[in-house]
Amino acid sequence: MQNEKQVPIAVVKRLPRYFRYLGEMLRNNVERISSSDLSEKMNVTASQIRQDLNNFGGFGQQGYGYNVEHLYNEIGKILGVDKGFKTIIIGAGNLGHAIANYSNLQKRGFTLIGIFDVDKSKTGQKINDISVFHMSELEQFMNNEKPDIAILTLPKDEVTEVAETLGRLGIKGIWNFSYSDLKISYDIPIENVHLSDSLMTLSYRININTTF
Amino acid sequence: MQNEKQVPIAVVKRLPRYFRYLGEMLRNNVERISSSDLSEKMNVTASQIRQDLNNFGGFGQQGYGYNVEHLYNEIGKILGVDKGFKTIIIGAGNLGHAIANYSNLQKRGFTLIGIFDVDKSKTGQKINDISVFHMSELEQFMNNEKPDIAILTLPKDEVTEVAETLGRLGIKGIWNFSYSDLKISYDIPIENVHLSDSLMTLSYRININTTF
DNA sequence: TAGATTGTTAATCGATTAACAATC
DNA sequence: TAGATTGTTAATCGATTAACAATC
């Protein structure tokens, strides 16, 4: 169980970017790429690419480089996008709507199977062809459909309770958009997305450009 | 100009989180906090907090700690949220809608002053009280209103051209949501947001939890 | 004053880069 | 085979943590 020494999170966070660039190349029918060519495109060092990839095994070949399609697929497997994880959205507000309509998620192998909201006026509607259910139906839905990932787009003072419920019902991971660092009593992965953090970083950079 | 040795980006990226926790404490009428108490709440080391803050000056006081309100305000200034940066959204699709309705941005001191789209059927509408203009009106609007930040929520094959235009018209920073690492010929800060990267990181973590 | 806690220097740790032998 | 490029070890760099003198 859980061994093989853990891959640094810094490395993991770079994988989606590799995946993105390789996908682009694949669409452009690029067959192979060397770490140094890729490093130029991506503005990182070739060393880093080789080091990163070798956390997961040797995907390249001396004198040849990396086969784009193969590497793309392998990184996809590492990231688990081949698993077809089933997702639900909780909170059918603006952000919930946007994510439900965000085709990239479907493309990356995540299948949206349901949307939940406490607002009864939304129940029964469809968003991007996916049904909106009332929160009271969540437990039964979880038992029947066994979604893997819950996307939480609800106010921050409601999020902990909902997340605890999801944990109890066996969710495998939570993608949290509420303005908080969600923590629950179940040991499952949670990714907290803080959109405004990124905007404030931008703001900082504008600010120093201007100030000094 | 631009000196005082640059603050590491790792530090800058932590500032919004400090800002968030301090804001929370401020709302709870906490008057002062020591680095060690804050470190416990935030799950980081006290050392890191003190080091991070001292990149920008000494905000604390020996034997006392940090005054919450003062520190909150100072970090706000560093981040530039006190500047009232004027923002526009380009792309009135689902994500554009969601962001326009995302009250946190207004709360963090960013003022949305216009939304643009190529789709004429959207022109003249209002989203969260903000007018939607046609893209052809962008240049004049920029000249008159001088927005600081452009939020780009449009398809990735349209984003570069629009961004170049914005650069030419004097935008100060770009918050890019399209599925690409936007690069333009003007030297202005760009923050690329890749929502699906974060989801894939979550997916990875679910995957290893399950596999090993 | 005595106690608490900062600001800051020094030590440690981890991540990135460089180098090169292995090998396709 | 010769050339290219990986996988991997070693060196460097930077970031985090520990320690403590300064000071409120």
Image (tube, coloured by chain):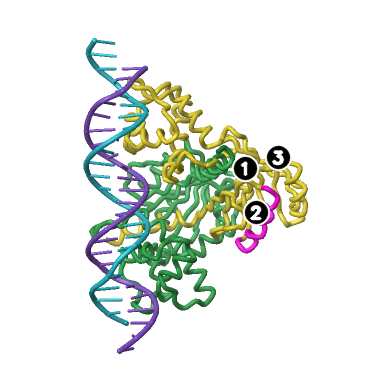
Chain colours: A yellow, B green, C purple, D cyan
Residue that badge 3 annotates: A129
Between the residue at mark 2 and the residue at mark 1, the CA separation in whole angstroms equals 12 Å
Q: Secondary structure at mark 2?
A: loop
Q: Earlier in the sequence, mark 2 or mark 3?
A: 2
Q: Which residues are magenta?
A: A156-170
Residue B128: x and y in percent read 59, 58
Parent chain of label 1: A
Residue A10, magenta (yes or no): no
Residue that badge 2 annotates: A93
Mark 2 touches mark 1? (CB < 8 Å)? no
Badge 2 and badge 3 in a common chain = yes
Between the residue at mark 1 and the residue at mark 3, the CA separation in whole angstroms equals 9 Å
Q: Earlier in the sequence, mark 1 or mark 3?
A: 1
Q: Secondary structure at mark 3?
A: loop
Category of crowding for the residue at label 2, using alpha-carbon neighbours closer than 10 angstroms: few (below 14), some (14–19), many (at least 20):
some
Q: Earlier in the sequence, mark 2 or mark 1?
A: 2
Q: Is residue A13 visible?
A: yes
D21 lies above or below A48: below
Q: Looking at the image, how many numbered discs can be counted on the residues?
A: 3
Between the residue at mark 2 and the residue at mark 3, the CA separation in whole angstroms equals 16 Å
Q: Residue at x 41, y 28 (%)?
A: A58
The image quadrant where one finds the N terminus of chain B is: bottom left
Parent chain of label 3: A
Residue B135: x and y in percent read 49, 45
Q: Is residue B206 left or right of residue B174?
A: right
Q: Nearer the viewer, residue B134 or A187?
A: A187
Residue that badge 1 annotates: A101
Q: Nearer the viewer, residue A16 or A4?
A: A4
Badge 1 and badge 3 in a common chain = yes
Q: Secondary structure at mark 1?
A: loop
Q: Residue at x 35, y 62 (%)?
A: B52
